[in-house]
Amino acid sequence: MGGRSYMVATTMPMSRAGFDAWLRTPLPGPDVIADPAAMWTGWAADGAGTDWDLAGLAGSPAAVAGIRAARAGTPLQRLAGRAAQGINVARHRGGALEVYLYDYHGDTYGSQTDLLMLAGAGRYAEEDAAVLHWGGDVYPDLPLGGDLPLAVLLVGRDGARFVDRFPVDTLIARLRPVEAAFLGAPTAVPVCGSSSRSSVRPALASSTASTAESGSGWSRMGIGQASDSPGA
């Protein structure tokens, strides 16, 4: 399932202190998910193999080492690396963690790492939340016209589990604000002294970095940093 584009998004109720703690907590292993083998069940890729143990990459030791290194890091490290590509939103706003991650020509191994990262956020969540995973030969907008996602992961303090059915329209409506932030960012955003802009779609401006609450707006400066700049 490589050579295509994959997205992960959530809005998860969480305190600012919880957000800061999550950024610096190492990612959990696949055992944080009660049913990792059920990742695709009931959705667009039903029946596909999940390969959480990376057995399908046995002939590519460098790729395996890279994935394992990413999964041994923290959300702060992962998001900082992704932010340099200019294709992410990860912010704390309105009492919630909001995430919209986009891998252009990515693969499902990267998406699984992102799902582990968000499963780990559940220990800091103030209530259970759903994480939407979708993709394929599509633009990075939320699924349209009844298109099925690839997976829905329910995350909470007691762990995470994939579900084979969920009110997707309701979830999409909840994710519209963070989608708008991703699609509507007018310029590339500097992170750790660098900036980038997606060239995937002429109308798409990249939104990078984590953002923090700042009055009625939100900052887009660097992961976990706040400013008084207005938000989208």
Image: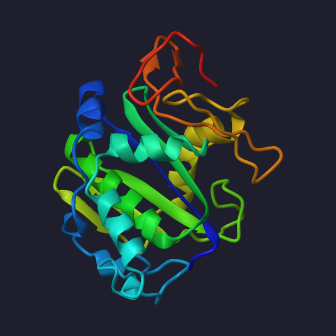
Residue 216 position in % (x across, y down): 52, 14
| Left or right: residue 100 compared with residue 62 | right
Residue 171 position in % (x across, y down): 50, 53
The answer to whether residue 90 shows anywhere in this view is yes
Q: Quadrant of residue 135?
A: bottom right
Residue at the far front in the pictured view: 62
Please report the residue visible at 34 percent of the width from the left and 37 percent of the height from the top. 13
Quadrant housing the C terminus: top right
Q: How many marks?
A: 0
Please report the residue visible at 66 percent of the width from the left and 56 percent of the height from the top. 140
Quadrant housing the N terminus: bottom right
Nearer to the camera, 70 or 50:
70
Nearer to the camera, 40 or 77:
77
| Left or right: residue 198 compared with residue 168 | right
121 in relation to 190, above or below: below
Please report the residue visible at 38 percent of the width from the left and 33 percent of the height from the top. 96
| Left or right: residue 38 compared with residue 29 | right
Please report the residue visible at 76 percent of the width from the left and 49 percent of the height from the top. 199
Residue 40 position in % (x across, y down): 44, 78
Residue at the far right in the pictured view: 202
The answer to whether residue 174 shows anywhere in this view is no
49 in relation to 35, above or below: below
